[in-house]
């Protein structure tokens, strides 16, 4: 019974986050109102506050959900190659392509009239970077168990930070950036 209740709660939460995404993209951060969201999903505003704490908490939940989906995609890219360098090129390229194609991610990364969201990927990005680092490092160690765990974590963090930096301020073509980040990561992991 508890599993059924949790699944129902997760479905409801996804519905709320889907609608919040639609409203955020249509109205911007300033136009996103918890009362409007509550009315649309058939809940009370207090229920949303109980679940997310605030509008900022709601947006943070959106970013974390987006991050989770995105990281599954990056793991698939890392797993698509046998060579460590090629795997990192694929993962970084997937990161850059996803950032370009996803409207919510684009809003979070660039601000686009929602300057309040940019800190989630800059000055307040610690949770995102930690999640990305931990997931990528864990995947690397499952795939290449001979890697040093501390090195894998450090390399994953460096790759995450470099990819975010390029997404926010793209200076070079994505293929070039993917190759450079992969080269840095592989040299860090295997200096020989």
Image (spheres, grey):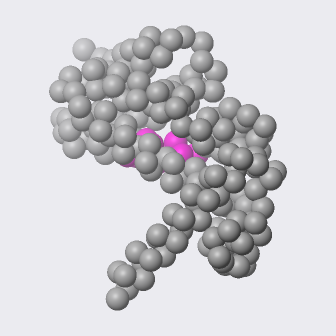
> Which residue, as the protein is rendered here, is positioned at the far right?
30
The answer to whether residue 89 is above or below residue 161 is above
Residue 125, image x, y percentages: 61, 43
Residue pictured at 52% horizontal, 25% vertical:
162
User: Which x, y percent locates residue 71?
Assistant: 41, 43
Q: Position of residue 180 (x, y in %)?
A: 42, 14
Q: Camera-side residue: 137 or 74?
A: 74
Question: Going by the image, does 10 lie left or right of 141?
Answer: right
Q: Nearer the viewer, residue 120 or 69?
A: 69
At 52% from the left and 32% from the top, the residue drawn is 101
Quadrant where the C terminus is found in the figure: top left
Is residue 11 visible in this depiction of the protein? yes
Residue 183's place in the image compared with 114, above or below, is above
Query: For the N terminus, which image quadrant?
Result: bottom left
Q: Main secondary structure of the magenta part?
A: helix
Tell which of 158 and 80 is nearer to you.
Answer: 80
The quadrant in which residue 150 appears is top left
Question: Left or right: where does residue 104 sit relative to residue 35?
Answer: left
Percent x, y for residue 79? Answer: 24, 35
Q: Is 171 included in the stretch rendered in magenta?
A: no
132 versus 35 height, above or below: above
- The residues colored magenta run 126-135
Q: Quadrant of residue 113?
A: top right
How many labels sit on residues? 0
Q: Which image quarter: residue 188?
A: top left
Q: Residue at x 56, y 22 (%)?
A: 166
**Residue 180 appears in the rendering:** no
In the image, 149: left or right of 95? left
Q: Does the magenta run of residues contain 130?
A: yes
Residue drawn at 71 percent across, 47 percent down? 26
């Amino acid at each position: 019974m508890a599993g059924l209740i949790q699944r129902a709660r997760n479905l409801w939460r996804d519905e709320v986050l889907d609608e919040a995404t639609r409203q955020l993209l249509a109205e911007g951060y300033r136009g996103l109102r918890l009362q409007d969201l509550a009315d649309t999903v058939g809940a009370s505003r207090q229920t949303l506050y109980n679940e997310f704490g605030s509008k900022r908490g709601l947006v943070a939940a959106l970013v974390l959900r987006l991050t989770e989906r995105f990281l599954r995609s990056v793991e698939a890219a890392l797993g698509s190659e046998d060579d460590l360098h090629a795997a990192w090129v694929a993962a970084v390229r997937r990161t850059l392509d996803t950032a370009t194609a996803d409207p919510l991610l684009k809003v979070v990364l660039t601000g686009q009239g929602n300057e309040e969201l940019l800190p989630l990927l800059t000055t307040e990005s610690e949770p995102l970077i930690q999640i990305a680092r931990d997931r990528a490092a864990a995947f690397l160690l499952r795939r290449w168990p001979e890697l040093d765990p501390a090195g894998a974590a450090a390399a994953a963090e460096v790759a995450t930070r470099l990819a975010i930096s390029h997404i926010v301020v793209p200076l070079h073509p994505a293929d070039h950036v993917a190759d450079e980040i992969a080269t840095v990561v592989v040299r860090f992991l295997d200096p020989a």
